Image (cartoon, rainbow, N blue to C red):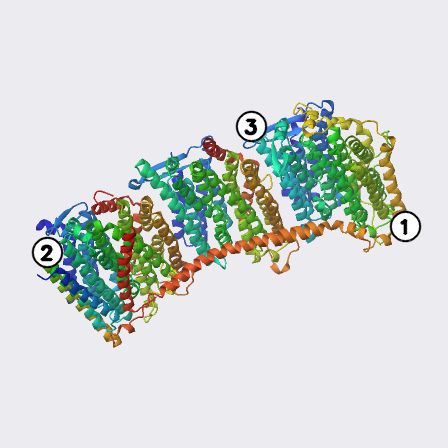
Amino acid sequence: MAENLMLFAPELTLVLTGLFVLMVGLFLPTGAKKVLGYLASIGILVALSLTVSSLGTEGMAFNDTLSVDALSQFFKIVFLVVALIVSIASIKYTEGNSHTEEFYALSIFATIGMMFVASANDIMVLFVAFELASLATYALAGFEKKNQKSLEAALKYFIIGSLSAAMLLFGISFIYGLTGTTSIPGIAANITALSTSPMGIVAVVLMLAGFGFKIALVPFHMWAPDTYQGAPSVVSALLAAGSKKMGIVAAFKIFIVALIALQAEWQIAFAILAVVTMTYGNVVALKQTSVKRMLAYSSLAQAGYISMAFVVLTPLALGGGILYALSHGFMKAGAFIVTAAVAYMVLSDNKDSEDTDHIDNFKGLGVRMPITALSMTIFVFALAGIPLTAGYMSKFVLFSSTIQSGFAWLAVIAILNSAISLYYYAKIVKYMYFLPTDLEKVSEPLPYVAALLIAVAGVFAIGFWPEPFIHWAMEAAMVLIPGGM
Amino acid sequence: MIPIELYIGLSAIIFSIGLYGLMTQRNGIRILMSVELMLNAANINLVAFSSYNADLTGQVFALYSIALAACEAAIGFAILMAIFKMKGTINLDSINILRW
Amino acid sequence: MLPILSLIVLIPLVFAALTLLTKTKEQARLMALVATVSVLILTLYMYLNFDSTTAAHQFEELYQWVPSLGITYHVGVDGIAMPLILLNAIVLPFLVLFTWNDERKSPNKFYALILGTEAAVIGVFTALDFFLFYVFWELTLIPLFFMVSIWGGPNKHHASIKFFIYTHVASLVMLLGIFGLYFAAWDMTGTPTLDIPTLLAQFQLIESALLKDMIFLALLFGFIVKIPSFPFHSWQPDAYTEAPTAGSVLFVMLKIGGYGLFKIMLPMLPFTGSPNMMITIMAVLGSVSIIYGAFLALSQKDLKRMVAYSSVSHMGYVLLGAAGLVSLSVSGAMFQQFSHGLIMSVMFMSCGIINNKTGTRIMNDLGGLAQKMPKLAVIMVLTFMASLGLPGLSGFIAEVSVLAGSFGNLPAYVIIALVAIVITGAYHLWALQRTMFGVFDKKLGTITDINRYQTLSMGVIAILILYFGLNPSAVLDMMLTNSEQIASMMAVMGV
Amino acid sequence: MAVENYAFLIPLLPALAFVLTFFFGKKLPNGGAIIPIAAIATSFVISLLITLNLLANPEEVVSQSFSWFAMLNIGILVDPLAAVMLTMVTFVSLLIHIYSLGYMSHDKAQSRYFAETALFTASMLGLILSDNILQLFICWELVGVCSFLLIGFWFQKPSAATAAKKAFLTTRIGDVMFLSGIVLLFTDLFKIYNGAIPDGVYILRFDVIFSHIPEIAAMNATIFGMEVSHITIITLLFFGGAVGKSGQFPLHVWLPDAMEGPTTVSALIHAATMVTAGVYLVARTFPMFIAAPSSLLVVAYLGAFTAIFAATMGIVMNDIKRVLAYSTISQLGYMMLGLGIGATIGAEAVGISLFHLINHAFFKALLFLCAGSVIHAVGTQDMRQMGGVAKVMPITAATMIIAALALGGFGIPGTIIGTSGFFSKDAIIESAYVFGASSGMWIPYVLSIVAALLTSLYIFRLIFMTFFGKARTDYGGHESPATMTIPLSILALFALFFGGLATERFNTFVSDTFMNDFVHVNIAELAEIGGYHLGHHGHEPLIILWLPLIVAAAGLLIAALVYGMKVVNMDRLVSRNNPIYKLLYNRYYQNELFTNFFSVKVVYEGLSYAGRAIDTGFDWLVGWLSDLVLETGESLRQFQTGAVQNYATAVITGVSLLIILIKVVMEVL
């Protein structure tokens, strides 16, 4: 039992941190709640260092319902990094808010949920953890109770989320019914009944809808633009950079490990969804005027790219997809933190400003907030896949793997999409640097800057020195398809 | 013993009713109820399969899912309350400032 | 042994960062000058120690980078790259000098971007690993995008985004080609590598002719958009015209498309499934570019736009010469890149000065400037003559080598190019007549001649145009060594 | 210390003078004129000494070569052909430079003038000295550029700038043909060597070229269904270059317009440094021409036609310089004719033609300088406003009449008494007779004899209109200063006596230019390849020897009657209603046809605008594509209605569709 717990030291740290923050917050006056942010960040940092230091350990726990392996470790790091960036940035965002402790507790619990999804070895644990993360983020999306947009975002997220959860559960019930087990390896072992039954396809599609909701695959994506736009920027960061990856890791586990016998079915589905999603996301992003909404559509597109890993299904492709998940975590979290910083700037210009995320606010950002603007430039160029950034490196591995496996058409579509996306990314750069503003320079809040610098460091670390990251990603991929394919 | 197909049929019907409600209802509470229906349809499945497979996992799972459904409802109501406080309505048609 | 190649990429990069931090114009331009001059010195050192009798790579550096994907940091230069590095190293200090007294907003960014471009462009020429090559290739886009967008003309946003996306698409297609080559080789050998010489050598082992053709065409597309060649040139006149003078000059320094053609396309050519089709494609695009660019230049009213189209025409020689497949034509095409870089820089500098002093580039509104700006007139006449292919100047050597070399294999296309020579003469002279000669229009106001920094920078490059026209061997020898290797390979393969 | 070793200085000194004058001329008196004068004088001395050496030992030509790049070289070759040209060019150029001291003394841009004329001379000398065809082409182009700069010397005048451009572009059409010829020649030689050129063989050097003529002649190309030998194509392309440079029909249009520059520049262009280059080119590559079936005939016919064609226009021009310009074109036609006749008389044609070239240089330079002197004094170029200038400018008048006699070709056959033009032109006309007699093609002879009549007519029309009769306007005027009259006198001496003194020695000297230790060409063998039958001067009837003199005298007589004594009232003839006059006066409407219609309408407006339309099309296509994507984005956005039920519907529809799709696809697979 003790060994089991040791394997989950990072999660336990987080649980303790979350509870501690929640309780301490009760006794602190609003003005002093800033300390909670530091506490949460330290807790996450500790969890992160525990995870990193335990890299390479493997083990099963709690009746084999949870497993620690390269895959789960990798994704845990992704979630923790995103949580760290978000929590640091939130120190500024929650400043002066009397509900600070709830914010941090919820984000930490959401992170815990994601981490358990990453290590789940049982479909039941997976579902519960999945819901834990979902429920926490529903509340986070509606954190600004006085903000109509935030509430609308939360409501839409919640409704579609519940629908998806129901579908997921319905799908799971069939899988359980036909295989007689909820253990992921067990399902793979007893798959015959399912794969021969007509219910197989239904179950696959229902699962797909459930995870597709989190990953935001067209047509299960409709909530995402609205929610990302309406929710507080730091929460959008958590959603886009973190909880989206939870959907991906869950899908990896369910489809590639448990339902590998139904590979033909879901491969077709993913092929269609990947192409539609990346194209739709990029094309619709072109004309957006809200930067957050644009980033939301860009997230769609990125999810589409990552989904190509399911189609290609080689170690390299999966490694690429996993690496992409990490890169996207840095890039997208960073980009949303930038919108948070801009929102802060706009609100300090004018307290009653409604459209804090409108692209016009980015005019002259290069002068007004130089570090923020430079970071944003790096993030968008990384998202566009300009070399020496994480985005390029992941695209390099992922796209090249499609060529390797003969999916040239998929690569061509992805490449064309990548080209289209440059237009709206460049548009942001254009607003920041090339359009003039007569507004004053703003001093950039330290927490935002710190969060941005972490993200930038991540983007460049993967861009310049991808070797260790590729190595880990490939090891993680090997967990999914042990023998290679 | 009642054949498993009947359970599945029942749960499918309930699930569909839930879906139908979700698509057609405009009132936030009814939407929540529809979601509950769908979750319960799944629970029926789980329990039925559990008994059919002579395996308790399904029933445990159903319990979990009931608990989760409760949480979900709580959060849903909280969000709807907040909206109602602000706008005086929970009609979904009036909640669409975020679009395109 | 100094890691010179790394240094000439790193120095401008580091100085670009430092320049960004400077506050005043004086500091920024000094930084830029120091960086570019150091690169020039290192390059000259390299040039003097360069062995032009071997086609092998020299000054090589090789470090592992991403072993699991076969990515290395591998740099080196051969006779194809050396002249182009030299070109950049020569022109850039003078470009900095040329802008020495200009007044513009945020000079620190301006000079940082110049240095950034230099680093990226030289990086492309040194890279011997496809990954590194592509990295630098893409990095050339960004400073230029900023350059055009910040200091460009009235239509700068349209031009910069068009340039950015258009060429990015091409780069991505090229990347697909690289992937194809990478995995085809990986499948055969079992070890991944992106090393350019290795992959080029393994290209011929690929069994599927279709795959080889696809790889070739994808790479070719990437290169000819960058050159640019008809019909993929439409980003170029806009970008060249809207860019600030320094930006236009940097665009001209961007000889990476042609470089790829010689470095990567030609060694692959004989092993493609249908080499003759590839040759025809290149020859057709080349010769059509030559005549098409000439006619369009003839029809332009804007001086800078005319120069931009003349560039399309001149770069057609690069494709045509490459398709000629004879050592003389190939080295002529390489020389054309070199010479064109020198000539066009001065031409764009002239356009910039005229635009600055008179406020217009519309040729019909100009006239008689030679009376007010005799120094500029002399330099401009010389470069225009060089551009129209006057013997004794560098442009001629390139053109005559391409024409004479290619005629044996591609007579029809060479005849098209020959016809274009007359048109080329026509638009150059007509432009001179309408800007420099004739009656001076009083409306243009008081106009002073170019300042001494401008005289120095343009004068030195003009003298170099003359020097390389009289002594082409200074760079042509190394080009010949490499093109002979290419030509002999063609001969062996019977292409 | 043999003077041969300094042959390379001949072009280099003027080139150096160009650099020095260009940069420092402004600070020196007279625009630094002394520098080019000294440089060209030195070049002249060197040339003269080399020529004298060669006269003694015609086999010992000067030849030096250095590798340039690839398989090409730069080098010099002074054989008899080059030697006489060098001497003439340096000599005439020197005199013109001295003359310019006075003529340009009032121009502010003097230093630029002297710099450019020095470069002009240097380029021409370089052209003559070239031992390979590429270097010749390079200098050939430099000559073109210098002419561009000098014709447009007064660039602030739009007409001058236009004329300069026209000159450059028109000759460039020829240049491109020349270049094409070189390209083809190179390709053939490359093929002959099978791509492997031994070290030390410079592929475009004349000795290499000449030694491979038979192999090139054996190569055939099919053009429009006809089998044509490569040597014919190459020589015709070369001749195309010569046509442009030497103002032969139809590329002569630039030459009359080239009068926009200073008159001294015209003198340089017409006498020494430019138009003769075309003739020189054909002479230099004569071994190729004679091996090329029908090339020489083209040369002969076109030369004869140009001779008469230009002469007809010369009769009606009123601008004194234009008359001389058409005269040049006409005389160049004679020279080409002389070369073309090589089809019958072999290498001797080179001697005859070059002899006329040299003589023509003397008297045409003289004519132009005299005309310049007149214009300088009178202040107009329109002969209708002159008259009686002889009284004011006796020296100018006298020298110009000498030049006119030389151009008209007056002299006594069978003796050495006669003007220089007499000896050379009569030799050409007589050879044309021989050509006619041996081949049965009489047209060149007839044209040349009629042109001789017209030549005499137009030049004496000029003399009478300018120097005799009463002053038609009040121009005032005076004799020019000594710096101008002394060169005139010297040239007059040469115009008068050079022909008679040099005629015998010159022809054999130059005709043997292909037989020495540099090249050894067997003209007779090559003529076999070309299908020509070389004959020899027979005994022409006496009338043939006298006929040129008779027609020249007749021309003089007509001019005297019409313009001197006014026996015939010209007003009736010279009216716009007379279609022939109109045609001639409008110069056969070539300007309208070539410049206005072809260049401006067809090439500029037609083709370039068509190109522009196509380019707009490409641009539009790119724009349309990007707009399409943007608009698609705009439409797709509408799916995101904001109503959450629609979202739920989308999810459910998506699920159903996916199930169906997968089923269908699985069935199909």
Which amino acid is tagged 1? Val
Q: Which residue is mark 2?
A: B53
Determine whether D90 is above or below A368 in the image.
above
Mark 3 crowdedness (10 Å alpha carbons): few <14, some 14-19, many ≥20: few
Residue D399 percent coordinates (x, y): 83, 40
Which amino acid is tagged 2? Asn
Residue C349 visible, this orientation:
no
* Mark 3: secondary structure: loop
Image quadrant occupied by the N terminus of chain C: top left
Residue A78 visible, this orientation:
yes
Which amino acid is tagged 3? Tyr
Q: Which residue is mark 1?
A: D568
Marks 3/2: CA–CA distance: 90 Å
Disc 3 chain ID: D
Residue A31 percent coordinates (x, y): 21, 67
Count of numbered labels shown in the rendering: 3
Q: Quadrant of residue A448?
A: bottom left
Please name which of the two marks, 1 or 3, marks the residue nearer to the observer.
3
* Mark 2: secondary structure: helix
Determine whether D398 is above or below A164 in the image.
above
Disc assigned to residue D193: 3
Q: Quadrant of residue A452?
A: bottom left
Mark 1 crowdedness (10 Å alpha carbons): few <14, some 14-19, many ≥20: few
Q: Are marks 3 and 2 in contact (CB under 8 Å)?
A: no
Do pointers 1 and 3 mark residues of a single chain? yes
Which of disc 3 and disc 1 is earlier in sequence? 3
Marks 1/3: CA–CA distance: 68 Å
* Residue D92 in the figure: left or right of residue C427: right
Q: Quadrant of residue D359?
A: top right
Disc 2 chain ID: B
Q: Residue at x 90, y 46 (%)?
A: D561
Residue A308 percent coordinates (x, y): 30, 51
